[in-house]
Image (cartoon, rainbow, N blue to C red):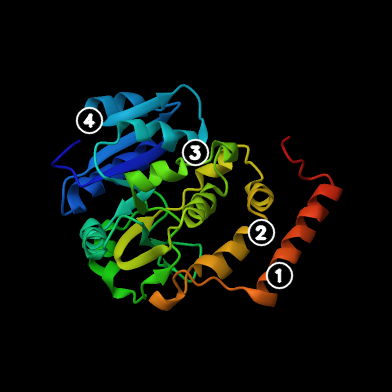
Amino acid sequence: MDKTAKFSILIPSWNNLAFLKLCIESIRRNSVCQHQIIVHVNDGSDGTLEWVRTEGLDFTHTERNVGVCMAMNMMRAKVQTDYICFLNDDMYVLPGWDEVLMQEIASLPDNRFFLSATTIQPHTKGNFIIVADYGDTVESFQEQQLLQHYRDYPLHDWMGATLPPNIVHRDIWDLVGGYSVELTPGMYSDPDFTAKLWLCGIRYMKGLSASRVYHFETKSTGRVKKNNGQMQFLMKWGMTSSTFRRLYTYRGQAFSPELIDNPVGGSRLRTHLLRGRLKALWYIIRGSFRPIL
């Protein structure tokens, strides 16, 4: 165990060196505490492998892109702290991001939690996402303007932590078995991980407004052949991911302790489940999804 580091930050990366450099520079510059940084190098033919070695970072490596799920599980073997934090390589952490998370963790009675920071990004909207354009490339990044104004956007703490950056205790990670490799390369692996936590009794899922990161939205997933994660989630859990988010974790709603461990039931849940199953049947009939047997 590393007694000086607070979090083990896991960063999967696939030939995205310019963003990875900026991401790690932001961790070093804008964090309150020291953290262990672990990178999984998918392929690395762009110089990423040589760079992480030069920087002395902990890393794992595969000669081809194995996706997010397998990368996360491989990096778990390098973890030296109690807390596993998942961060995308195209994210820039903002000052004090880690202090807010640490304060929240210290206020909790046990390790049965799942926390997320709040994302600022240039394009994609969401009820728990701040949309503000400070650039979507390294070259167009308006770093100084972002550092001056990232606190100016009001947002409440929100229900239903899911997307990175997120953090969980290593014991809870091990309890659910990490990320599900059947979802390789990783579409819908985030809600699946959350569903596994919920199944194991983790109810305290909270997004923290004051912990903020900037997400460039490079959409590197456009370079891979995607798994049909939407239908895989439905077949695995018996409901759509949107049903799980809305009726079980209330993702994006203002955080309320009264909603914890209080999923919606009755006719509303039955209606959502029926819609999901009809959707699955339609996909199967038209031949766009074939369950893996």
In the image, residue 40 lies at what x, y percent? 38, 32
What separation in Å lies between label 1 and label 4 (alpha carbons)? Answer: 53 Å
Q: Which mark is residue 69?
A: 3
Please tell me whether mark 4 sits on a helix, a strand or a loop.
helix
Q: Which residue type does callout 1 highlight?
A: Arg
Give whichever of 32, 83 is nearer the camera. Answer: 83
What separation in Å lies between label 4 and label 2 (alpha carbons)? Answer: 44 Å
User: Are dots 1 and 2 in contact, CB under 8 Å?
Assistant: no
Residue at 46% x, 40% y is 177
In which quarter of the view is residue 15 placed? top left
Give the mark, 3 or 2, whose residue is nearer the N terminus.
3
What separation in Å lies between label 4 and label 3 (alpha carbons)? Answer: 25 Å
In which quarter of the view is residue 134 placed? bottom left
User: Are dots 4 and 2 in contact, CB under 8 Å?
Assistant: no
Q: Which mark is residue 5?
A: none
Q: Which residue is mark 2?
A: 239
